[in-house]
Image (tube, helix red, strand yellow):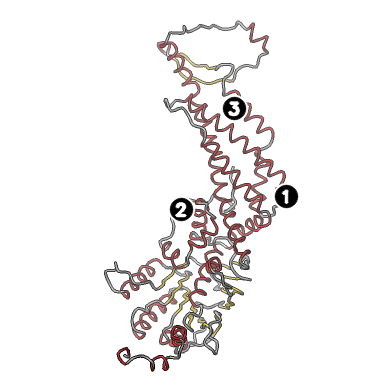
């Protein structure tokens, strides 16, 4: 049995190795905030959601497959949560059954396996009941296959057969074995047989065959009989244990895969409470450069802020370079993070924080953000930035997305602009899409003057009174980031006035 709720023809790989840029993506896009909202305290959901986000799907059809399963879960949240809970209960019930600690033997293995399978059967029956009661409410190919599989494989004849086998394996009527004799009358080929069906009267008067009785104190006799039993049940014990492992694996994978969707339900409910709209994005093949959105917002900011979080519109179809400039504290970094989160959530098969989004699949998402001063660094900040960019260059590939936030701002504008220009040009030539937030006018204006068809220039808006509406719109780079607005906000006066009232000893 296979759940196939996250992939059409394979299980979700919970042990898959995460990409090398995991730590940078987690820090720069604040993924821990997103994962915390999804998990609601459940560590398994953290694990599966993190892998779903970072191990991106590369096929639009695979993304749509997952979106449709999630759409069913959003329509039937109680059923999805019941499935997750049932799988957890089944695994907990199995874990509560302990085998004999005295010695590892086929007989003990068989006894433990029979107990575990008997426990699993009760949960399989509940699964079948859920399929009968709710199967028709689901329309996605993933759930249609899942419930059809339950109906086909868990029918009443199956339960009758497995329960009869479990009853027989308790050996309430003794154990029937046969074997062959070899040289020296040594037994071989021990095989467990199903006892003949006899009436009670027939068993009472059956005198066929030979028998003997072991005296109560004959320890060697009992030991020899036990060895015969072990040989007889060895194959059956192994087969039963394998059957238990198969059902165990099914419940493990069901809990993992449905756990991802429960995490999405938790996130959707949190965002709805906070007034954050969601939409299923339209994934486009990677050979078509697409990025157009309406009302795109930073999901992590929405989860942590009590203030209104505004969405932005973007039309970057066919654009391989998006340069974002404008006023300090105007929402540039937040906008960049919203794009990165939307890309990861799209390729995980999730909804996104937007009214609508159409985006192409990328081979990988990378980030190069400025870092705060680190006292443990053995070299300067510029060297550290260059080293990180070098690592990215070694791993990034065509059709990847690189998000740069104030990269190379640790040096003077002339030097930082020249370094960034060379890096960006090399990446564009390699087929990488670059989104770059910067306050370096030299860098932004040099690309703007080239009038590149595949470049888009956005600017954080600023009101005439210096207010920040936190909106990003298309606009030419300006030679100022309006740092005086921040100065006025701190000192309450324009720069000239504030300087005039400073004591002479404090003037530079």
Give the labeled residue for mark 2: 16
Question: Alpha carbon of mark 3 to alpha carbon of mark 2: how far?
Answer: 36 Å
Q: Position of residue 439 (x, y in %)?
A: 43, 83
Please rate how many residues cluster around mark 1, counting C-alpha atoms within 10 Å: few if below 14, some from 14 to 19, many from 20. few
Quarter-of-image position of residue 375: bottom left
Q: Position of residue 187 (x, y in %)?
A: 45, 15
Give left or right: position of 148 versus 353: right
Q: CB of mark 3 within 8 Å of CB of mark 2?
A: no
Give the labeled residue for mark 3: 166
Residue located 56% across and 54% down the image: 260
Give the labeled residue for mark 1: 136
Q: CB of mark 1 within 8 Å of CB of mark 2?
A: no
Q: Which disc, if any, is residue 368?
A: none
Residue located 56% across and 51% down the image: 257
Return the residue nearer the eye: 432 or 375: 375
Residue located 53% across and 82% down the image: 468
Question: Alpha carbon of mark 3 to alpha carbon of mark 1: how far?
Answer: 32 Å
Q: Residue furthest left?
A: 378
Return the residue nearer the eye: 419 or 338: 338
Give left or right: position of 20 versus 257: left
Of the image marks 3 and 2, the number of the one nearer the N terminus:
2
Of the image marks 1 and 2, the number of the one nearer the N terminus:
2
Q: CB of mark 3 within 8 Å of CB of mark 1?
A: no
Return the residue nearer the eye: 388 or 491: 491
Quarter-of-image position of residue 75: bottom right
290 relative to 77, above or below: below
Question: Alpha carbon of mark 1 to alpha carbon of mark 2: how far?
Answer: 34 Å
Please rate how many residues cluster around mark 2, counting C-alpha atoms within 10 Å: few if below 14, some from 14 to 19, many from 20. few
Q: Secondary structure at mark 2?
A: loop
Q: Secondary structure at mark 3?
A: helix
């Amino acid at each position: 049995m296979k759940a196939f709720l996250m992939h059409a023809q394979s299980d979700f790989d919970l042990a898959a190795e995460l990409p090398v840029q995991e730590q940078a993506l987690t820090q720069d896009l604040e993924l821990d905030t997103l994962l915390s909202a999804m998990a609601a305290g459940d560590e398994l959901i953290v694990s599966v959601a993190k892998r779903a986000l970072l191990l991106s799907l590369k096929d639009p059809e695979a993304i749509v497959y997952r979106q449709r399963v999630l759409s069913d879960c959003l329509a039937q949240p109680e059923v999805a949560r019941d499935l997750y809970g049932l799988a957890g209960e089944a695994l907990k019930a199995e874990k509560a059954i302990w085998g004999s600690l005295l010695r590892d033997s086929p007989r003990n293995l068989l006894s433990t396996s029979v107990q575990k399978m008997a426990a699993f059967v009760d949960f399989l029956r509940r699964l079948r009941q859920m399929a009968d009661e709710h199967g028709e409410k689901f329309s996605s190919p993933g759930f249609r296959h899942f419930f059809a599989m339950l109906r086909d494989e868990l029918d009443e004849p199956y339960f009758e057969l497995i329960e009869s086998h479990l009853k027989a394996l308790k050996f309430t009527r003794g154990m029937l074995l046969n074997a062959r004799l070899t040289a020296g009358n040594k037994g071989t080929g021990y095989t467990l047989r199903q006892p003949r069906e006899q009436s009670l009267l027939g068993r009472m008067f059956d005198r066929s065959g030979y028998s003997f009785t072991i005296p109560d104190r004959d320890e060697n006799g009992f030991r020899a009989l036990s060895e015969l039993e072990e040989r007889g049940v060895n194959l059956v014990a192994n087969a039963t244990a394998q059957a238990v492992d198969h059902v165990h694996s099914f419940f493990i994978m069901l809990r993992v895969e449905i756990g991802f969707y429960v995490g999405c339900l938790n996130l959707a409910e949190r965002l709805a409470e906070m007034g954050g709209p969601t939409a299923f994005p339209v994934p486009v093949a990677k050979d078509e450069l697409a990025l157009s959105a309406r009302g795109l917002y930073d999901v992590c900011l929405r989860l942590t802020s009590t203030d209104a979080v505004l969405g932005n519109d973007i039309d970057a179809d066919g654009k391989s370079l998006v340069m974002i400039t404008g006023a300090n504290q105007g929402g540039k970094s937040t906008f960049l993070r919203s794009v990165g989160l939307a890309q990861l959530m799209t390729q995980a098969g999730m909804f996104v924080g937007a009214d609508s989004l159409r985006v192409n699949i990328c081979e990988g998402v990378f980030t190069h953000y400025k870092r705060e001063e680190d006292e443990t660094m053995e070299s300067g900040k510029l060297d550290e930035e260059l080293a990180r960019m070098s690592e990215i260059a070694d791993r990034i590939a065509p059709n990847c997305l690189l998000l740069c936030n104030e990269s190379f701002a640790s040096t003077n504008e002339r030097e930082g602009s020249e370094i960034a220009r060379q890096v960006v040009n090399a990446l564009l030539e390699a087929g990488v899409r670059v989104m770059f937030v910067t306050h370096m006018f030299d860098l932004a204006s040099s690309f703007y003057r080239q009038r590149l068809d595949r470049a888009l220039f956005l600017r954080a808006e600023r009101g005439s009174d210096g207010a920040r509406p936190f909106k990003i719109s298309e606009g030419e780079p300006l030679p100022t980031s309006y740092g005086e607005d921040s100065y006025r906000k701190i000192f309450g006066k324009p720069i000239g006035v504030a300087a005039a009232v400073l004591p002479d000893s404090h003037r530079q």
